[in-house]
Image (cartoon, rainbow, N blue to C red):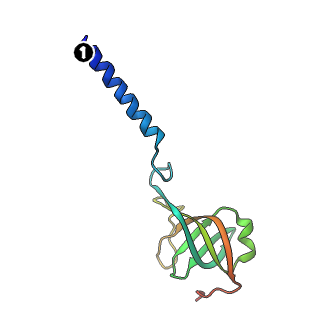
Amino acid sequence: MPKTLMLALAFLLSTAWVTAQNQYPQTGSSQPGTTASQPTTIQGCLQESNGNYTLTSDSGMTYQLQGDSSMLSKHVGHEVRITGSTSSSGNSSSAMSTNSGQSQETLMVKSMKHISTTCSNKK
């Protein structure tokens, strides 16, 4: 009888532990090797190539933009301030390399503010 009671208690505790793990999942993406961050605001020059939008920040970092491109298309070549969440991944499609050898992060666009019709960081 005591062995049966201990086995039942162990089963109940493990079930409670599994339930607690599912109730409070870790933050971030569910894809392995991918991390997500809190909302970030980045100001820089908006560029477009073959339907792909990038934002080069004033510090020189380039972000691959994802999200609603309809708000971006009117501001190509302009300085903008974009708020969204950044993520980087170990696969080559998201963490691409720029001509200068720097890695690119992906920025999921939540909102955009137009700053200027010219880019201050254009070289």
Can residue 78 be seen?
no
- Return the residue at label 1: 3
Residue type at tag 1:
Lys
Does 109 sit left or right of 38 as displayed?
A: right
Residue 122 in picture, x, y percent from top left: 60, 87
Does 113 sit left or right of 88 as displayed?
A: right
Q: Residues within 10 Å of mark 1 (few under 14, many from 20)?
A: few
Residue at horizontal 51 percent and vertical 81 percent from the top:
60
70 or 114: which is nearer to us? 114
- Location of residue 13 (image quadrant): top left
Residue at horizontal 63 percent and vertical 65 percent from the top:
109
Residue at horizontal 61 percent and vertical 88 percent from the top:
120
Can residue 81 be seen?
yes
Residue 51 in picture, x, y percent from top left: 69, 67
Residue 35 in picture, x, y percent from top left: 47, 57
- Secondary structure found at label 1: helix
Q: Is 101 situated above or below 22?
A: below
- Location of residue 8 (image quadrant): top left
Residue at horizontal 60 percent and vertical 79 percent from the top:
44
Instruction: Locate the N terminus and report the quarter of the image it occupies.
Output: top left
